[in-house]
Image (cartoon, grey):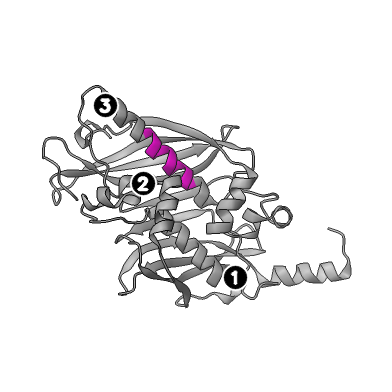
Amino acid sequence: MPRLHWEDFSPGQVTDCGSRLITRAEIVAFAAEYDPQPMHLDELAASATLLGGLVASGWHSCCILMRMLTDNLLADASFMGAPGVEEVKWLAPLRPGERIRARATVLETRASRSRSDLGFVKFRFELFDASDKALMTLIVSPMFGRRSAALASEASAQRGDSK
Amino acid sequence: MKFFEDIRVGETSEIGSHTFTAEDIKTFAERFDPQPFHVDDAAAARSHFGRLCASGWHIACIWMRLLIDRRRHEDDERRARGEPVAQLGPSPGFRDLQWLKPVYPGDTVSYGTEVVETRPLNSRPGWGMIFMRNTGVNQHGEPVISFISSAFVERRGEGRQTP
């Protein structure tokens, strides 16, 4: 059983979701496959824009954030995905060589109206650069399994109950 | 890219289709969204998804790739006709992203865009902002993804400026 269930989240909780260095090579590799615009691929072309140099695709920032959130929070929780994302704001460019930090803040929690085995936790996820400038924010309400349902499921399995 | 003044609310565009394979689903998810239901067939079968399905971020990133390919193709045609080409600027973000149905291996998603708003920017005279409702529909005609994106688009006749 994962350590964290829906009941373990409460508004105001802040979780540090790690830090890592973003390289030019990974920026270009992602962009080549998913967002092949010059500002994400080529230093010379990018330097001709206000961005002033190569920057990561905003979608790449989302993917980097998702991986950091998984490694530092979601993998240890009864995470069941999300039906969508309320909003993403790309506030400042993510540049090669940046050491970024991710953070998760719980905004609210609510039980599911239709299912007793899961609830929603609304988060603001954020990426910061080394100077603590916010590079992006993401508002989302993923689903987490409820502990009561997980315990009941385990007990049933131990009894050898058929499904 | 068309110039901002030439873009009409209600304009639609089909930007292409993509078939998701199990191998690609796992490769993307192992890198950016390593939830059990996106990387492991047995774990996915035990999950509420019932079988392996694509990361919602993967579904969105394919939209981006197809969009840029389409824009590049249209711009090549404009240049061939001797017409000017507008710059597509950065995006400040997106909102109201919905992952409506899972995308399973073998599913083909066809993507389209619809302009829902055009907004002149007094603060940035050379540029306007456009908002598009973007959708993906699977081979059964079921919507699988929908979101509202935004981007700066160059205005005609102001000379090259950066936002």
Residue identifier under label 3: B78
Up-down relation of residue B149 to residue A117 (above or below): above
Highlighted range, magenta = B60-70
Left or right: A55 in relation to B141: left
Front disc: 2 or 1: 2
Residue positioned 54% across, 58% down in the render: B31
Query: Cα distance, mark 2 to mark 3?
Result: 24 Å
Label 2 is found on which chain of the structure? B
Mark 3 Cα-neighbour bin, 10 Å: few <14, some 14–19, many ≥20: some
Residue A6 numbered tag: 1
Q: Does the magenta stretch include residue B63?
A: yes
Q: Count neighbours of disc 2 (C-alpha within 10 A) and say few if under 14, some if 14 to 19, many if 20 or more.
A: many
Q: Position of residue B116 (x, y in %)?
A: 33, 39
The image quadrant of residue A131 is bottom left
Q: Where is residue B129 in the image (x, y as percent from the top left)?
A: 25, 45
Q: Can residue A73 be seen in this view?
A: no
Q: Are marks 1 and 3 on the same chain?
A: no
